[in-house]
Amino acid sequence: MPFALPHLAAGLIAVLVGYTSSVVLIIQAAAAAGADAAQVSSWLWTLGIGMGVSCIGLSLYYRVPVLTAWSTPGAALLITSLGNFSLGEAIGAFVISSLLITLCGISGWFDRLMRHIPAPLAAAMLAGVLLRFGLDLFRVAPQDPLLLGALLLAFLIGRHLWPRYTMVLVLATGMLLCTLRGELQLSTVHWQLSSPVWITPTFSLDALLGIALPLFLVTMTSQNMPGITILRAHGYQPATSSLITWTGLTGLLLAPFGGYAFNLAAITAAICMGKEVDPDANRRWPAAVWAGCFYLLTGCFGATVVALFSAFPTALVTCVAGLALLGTIGSSLHSALQQDEEREAALLTFIITASGISLLGVGSACWGLLVGIGLYSVNRLRA
């Protein structure tokens, strides 16, 4: 695998953003299921190993930057729904949900659905999903104007002098500034290996209806759909059915250890697909491989990972994520709005997705696509 510092930096930033944004939800979900400390550590071990192996394997095989992730909306769902079930029933529901994802991939149903989504609407949905990261970048200003100013300056200098190394410079500047201000306390982190803990699954109709089916639907609509959209928005034509199948099989294998859901990444994947990673889209896949390597490390040291990522100030992670995604947000909006006859439907898709609404347990990305496709179809009939 060719080595380039931008690849490594993009992989590190993707994992940093992924963990700091939602690892607390994983811990809360495990606690809601009644997991003890060793089992919580096992959940983190399982998710890190599963994401690491799948990122590395799929990216190396397809030569495409394929990032997998846990289902963040799924974790939020579990926090509110696991309290009424035993830990064994929760694990059984994870197995069923992963089985349904696998069947979706094998049957080709999901691939056929994705082929009927117009490209401008998919780009609009992607822009809506990522918009909050761009907005959050400037919401840091009232609390920490010095950090935002320093990172913006590093970003501008990098874009002018070393475009490929822009995010490397931004991340290094942020870590240096936080270290000088005493905000980056890595010395308090003590490394300790984690190990998997087997939890025997039990199956019940209540857990199927209360956990498995909602988790499956949330994972497919809120995670896998944007994940495929991001790949296609960057010019990649992935083997959709194969990718979905592999994420489902990963979940089937690792569910008894706490791997509640594996899916294609959306937001973190975009970090590894921008022009800053490599001008040649065909040479960006090593960034996803590096992300997989970092996922493996976080999995092996699952008991320590919370302390490690909590050592990074929230403002730093927010700013780095926002700057890393600016290019993707801009290119997505350009692709979504450049055709006059499709602009209105794309704009509606973008606005609904960016609103963050959730109705009937379905997230804003799915609603944005549904409404946008409805208007798109009406416009086509009128034409």
Image (cartoon, grey):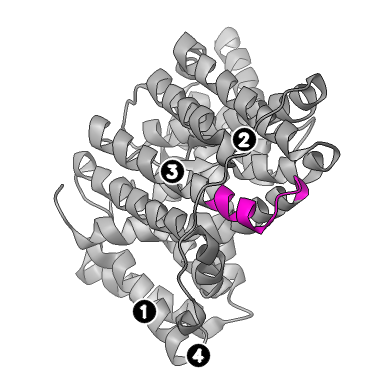
Q: Quick check: 310 above or below 108?
A: below
Between discs 4 and 3, the one toward the N terminus: 3
Between discs 3 and 2, the one toward the N terminus: 3
Q: Which residue is mark 2?
A: 365
Q: Position of residue 200 (x, y in %)?
A: 64, 33
Mark 3 residue type: Met
Kindly report the distance in space between the C-alpha atoms of the residues bearing marks 1 and 2: 34 Å
Mark 2 residue type: Ala
Kindly report the distance in space between the C-alpha atoms of the residues bearing marks 4 and 1: 14 Å
Kindly report the distance in space between the C-alpha atoms of the residues bearing marks 2 and 4: 39 Å
Q: Quick check: 378 above or below 4?
A: above
Mark 4 residue type: Gly
Q: Which residue is mark 1?
A: 173
- Residue lying farthest to the left in this orientation: 2
Q: Which residue is mark 3?
A: 51
Callout 4: helix, strand or loop? loop
- Residue lying farthest to the right in this orientation: 84
Circles 3, 2 touching at the beta carbon (< 8 Å): no
Q: Which residues are magenta?
A: 32-44
Circles 2, 4 touching at the beta carbon (< 8 Å): no
Q: Is residue 380 visible?
A: yes
Between discs 1 and 3, the one toward the N terminus: 3
Q: Quadrant of residue 339?
A: top left
Horizontal relation, residue 161 to residue 102: left or right: left
Callout 1: helix, strand or loop? helix
Between discs 4 and 1, the one toward the N terminus: 1
Q: Nearer the viewer, mark 4 or mark 3?
A: 3
Q: Nearer the viewer, mark 3 or mark 2?
A: 3
Tag of residue 343: none
Q: Which residue is mark 4?
A: 182
